[in-house]
Image: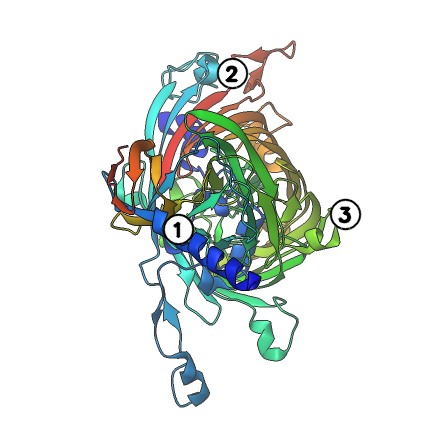
């Protein structure tokens, strides 16, 4: 009897959460190509760091993917899949208009990974000091609510609890654009970004 | 006669400006691989260790080349066709885009005031000994340089190609000429089970495998020792030069070259068999003159191509990293990224040839006129070193040149050994990449030539005081505006020179040919 009661309460709780979680979808305009949209810091809320390690690869003299979005606290594995030596560094971690110190991860053999944990939000412009044409971006965001747009600018952030948020749009080489959004179920929010 | 006396000055200007080496970076590779010039070059066209490996591999990435090509090659036969050989043509490829690069450069030159303080020995009509010639060489000069096209790549099966040509020189379309043009069959030693890269064949016209390239040097002015021809040593019988070997080490060779090893580590060798250098000479009738010279046509010279010259170069490079993996890799693993190795390389080279010179003479009967040809053996031999630490590179080369002089005998029926013509010299250069876009250069060139010395006592020792022929210190700095645009500056300090000294041993009308040169070039 007790067990059944607990199960019923858990089900109710889950249904209640599902009922209050929505999404933010829309389009980033003003620029072409992939952008990043995320929910900015929520006062009084913290989120556990994800356990999975996304991989930023160096392959064919390219950073792949070109843009990666991760939550603060995520450890990214940097992989060199090329048969040439590479290096990974970022001159700074851009936090809005503020420059935080960058990092040079050095170099490592083909096929090996070098992990790095991003403890602060910001944008790391990845560079390789051997191949100056190579560039990639890791956008470190403060919440788990983020999405990368497709090439036409469309995005959808899933599982966003209802509430009031500041949504930020980021695009390579453009100024961040933020917008207040009230989420109530599936919510539309278009964002305009300009260079 | 005036023209003759001014010729040395024009020659100096030509050496400083027009003999500027071809600086071939290869933007075609940038396009093909989608990568910057700096992947292969430090201050183009100087190669970094990766660029040396790329060149060794036949203008390919040394490993997994296909992973890096952004423009797929066009197949000239499916790879599976290889199974059908010899009933099909062995399949190859051509680059997916024409592998064309273009380059243009221009110069500004300033020559010191005393450069025109050239002592007139009185040989000019209407002049008197001791007078000073009016300025013969402009002290400042804007000069368009080379507009060059170059193509290079790989046809598959490890067959590499290179062709470069100067479409115009100094604004004159007719002045251009082929630089290098060759096919390179990389690692053909595999066909006979030799170790990897032990044997490569190159066929065509190419710069000899010099320890330090002249054609693809970063310097504005060439290395003096590479440009040294051995001309001089008067024939005591008639006063005319008996050695007139115009070939110099910087000349392109026509022939074949076997090579092996690597430029970025370990051993490297090359052995070339090339035609004699015939540039600047002709076998036309005026070059078969009277042995007494003068109005009969003077003494003429040319080289024939029947004898093949030999050039050999061998070197060993010690990479000095403690970590074995890093030491053996193409680039060293530095704490903040790959970089060139710390290394010491040592090498030796030699060139053996025969310089052909024709004279009018007689057959052994002493009566029947005939053209007599002297094949004068000559050799060049030298050694070199290069030390690199991070972005500092110190390198140098020493060379000794020796020509056997064959003089007409008293009956003009044959030849007898005359005085040998010798020279020696070399250069030492320090390159320091201060920043990835700033290169500082300090260089010392020196050539001592017995031939120039003897000529110098006559009328044309224009290089330096008697006894020391060519000696200069050349600091320079270069800035990369972009990876493909460069501006360069150098200043050539030369010793004071004079053609005549007074009774107290003081130079009369001394002069210097100090020269400042600026260059601006771009490749695309």
User: For the residues marked 2 and 1, what is the alpha-carbon distance in whole angstroms?
Assistant: 98 Å
* Residue A179 shown left or right of residue B321 in the figure: left
Q: Quadrant of residue B352?
A: bottom right
Question: Closer to the camera, B302 or B11?
Answer: B11
Residue B291's disc is: none
The residue lying at 48 percent from left, 19 percent from top is B121
Residue B146 seen: yes
In percent of width and height, residue A146 lies at 39, 45
Chain for numbered disc 1: A
Please identify the residue farthest to the right as the structure is shown.
B322
Quick one: SS at disc 2?
Answer: loop
Quick one: SS at disc 1?
Answer: helix
User: Which residue is tagged 2?
Assistant: B511
User: Which residue is tagged 1?
Assistant: A16
CB under 8 Å between discs 2 and 3: no
Residue B524's place in the image compared with B137, above or below, is below
User: For the residues marked 2 and 3, what is the alpha-carbon distance in whole angstroms?
Assistant: 52 Å
Q: Quadrant of residue B82?
A: bottom left
In percent of width and height, residue B136 lies at 37, 20
Mark nearer the N terminus (2 vs 3): 3
Of badges 2 and 3, the one in the foreground is 3
Please identify the residue farthest to the front as the structure is shown.
A1
Residue A138's place in the image compared with B126, above or below, is below
Q: Residues within 10 Å of mark 1 (few under 14, many from 20)?
A: few
User: Which residue is tagged 3?
Assistant: B322
Asked if labels 2 and 1 share a chain, the reply is no
The residue lying at 65 percent from left, 47 percent from top is B333
């Amino acid at each position: 009897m007790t067990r059944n009661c607990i199960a019923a309460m858990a089900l109710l709780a889950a249904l209640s959460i599902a009922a209050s979680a929505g999404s933010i979808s829309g389009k980033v305009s003003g620029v072409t190509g992939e952008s990043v949209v995320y929910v900015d810091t929520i006062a009084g809320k913290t989120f556990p760091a994800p356990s999975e390690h996304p991989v930023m690869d160096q392959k064919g003299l390219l950073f792949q993917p070109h843009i990666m979005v991760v939550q603060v606290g995520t450890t990214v594995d940097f992989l060199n899949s090329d048969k040439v030596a590479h290096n990974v560094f970022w001159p700074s971690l851009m936090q809005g208009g503020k420059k935080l110190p960058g990092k040079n991860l050095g170099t490592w053999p083909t096929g090996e990974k070098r992990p790095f944990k991003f403890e602060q939000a910001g944008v790391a412009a990845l560079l390789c000091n051997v191949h100056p044409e190579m560039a990639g971006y890791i956008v470190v965001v403060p919440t788990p609510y983020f999405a990368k747009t497709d090439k036409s600018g469309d995005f959808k952030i899933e599982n966003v609890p209802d509430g009031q948020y500041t949504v930020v749009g980021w695009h390579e080489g453009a100024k961040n654009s933020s917008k207040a959004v009230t989420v109530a179920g599936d919510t539309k929010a278009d964002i305009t970004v300009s260079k | 006669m005036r023209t003759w006396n001014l010729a040395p000055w024009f020659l100096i200007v030509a050496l400083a400006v027009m003999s500027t080496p071809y600086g071939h970076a290869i933007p075609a590779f940038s396009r093909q691989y989608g990568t910057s010039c700096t992947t292969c070059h430090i201050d183009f066209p100087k190669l970094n260790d990766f660029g040396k490996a790329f060149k060794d591999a036949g203008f390919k990435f040394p490993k997994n080349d296909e992973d890096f090509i952004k423009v797929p090659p066009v197949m000239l036969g499916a790879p599976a066709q290889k199974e059908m050989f010899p009933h099909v043509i062995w399949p190859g490829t051509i680059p997916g885009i024409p592998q064309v690069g273009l380059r243009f450069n221009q110069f500004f030159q300033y020559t010191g005031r005393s450069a025109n303080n050239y002592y007139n020995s009185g040989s000019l009509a209407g002049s008197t000994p001791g007078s000073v010639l009016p300025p013969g060489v402009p002290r400042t000069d804007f000069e368009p340089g080379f507009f060059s096209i170059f193509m290079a790549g790989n046809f598959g099966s490890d067959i590499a190609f290179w062709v470069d040509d100067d479409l115009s020189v100094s604004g004159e379309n007719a002045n251009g000429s082929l630089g290098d043009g060759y096919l390179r069959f990389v690692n053909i030693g595999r066909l006979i089970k030799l170790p990897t890269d032990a044997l490569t064949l190159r066929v065509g016209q190419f710069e000899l495998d010099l320890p330090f390239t002249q054609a693809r040097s970063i310097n504005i002015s060439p290395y003096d020792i590479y440009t040294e021809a051995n001309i001089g040593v008067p024939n005591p019988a008639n006063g005319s030069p008996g050695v007139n070997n115009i070939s110099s080490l910087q000349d392109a060779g026509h022939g074949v070259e076997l090579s092996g090893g690597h430029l970025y580590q370990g051993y490297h060798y090359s052995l070339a068999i090339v035609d004699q250098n015939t540039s600047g000479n002709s076998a036309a009738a005026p070059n078969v003159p009277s042995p007494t010279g003068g109005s009969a046509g003077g003494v003429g010279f040319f080289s024939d191509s029947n004898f093949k010259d030999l050039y050999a170069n061998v070197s060993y490079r010690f990479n000095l990293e403690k970590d074995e993996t890093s030491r053996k890799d193409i680039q060293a693993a530095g704490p903040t990224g790959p970089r060139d190795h710390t290394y010491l390389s040592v090498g030796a080279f030699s060139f053996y040839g025969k310089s052909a010179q024709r004279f009018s003479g007689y057959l052994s009967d002493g009566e029947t006129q005939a053209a007599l040809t002297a094949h004068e053996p000559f050799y060049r031999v030298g050694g070199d070193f290069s030390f690199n630490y991070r972005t500092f590179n110190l390198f140098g080369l020493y060379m000794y040149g020796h020509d056997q002089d064959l003089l007409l005998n008293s009956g003009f029926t044959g030849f007898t050994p005359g005085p040998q013509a010798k020279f020696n010299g070399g250069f030492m250069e320090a390159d320091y990449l201060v920043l990835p876009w700033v290169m500082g250069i300090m260089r010392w060139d020196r050539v001592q030539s017995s031939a120039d010395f003897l000529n110098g006592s006559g009328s044309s020792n224009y290089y330096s005081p008697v006894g020391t022929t060519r000696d200069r210190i050349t600091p320079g700095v270069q800035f990369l505006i972009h990876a493909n645009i460069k501006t360069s500056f150098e200043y050539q300090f030369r010793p004071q020179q004079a053609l005549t000294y007074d009774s107290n041993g003081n130079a009369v009308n001394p002069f210097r040919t100090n020269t400042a040169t600026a260059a601006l070039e771009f490749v695309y």
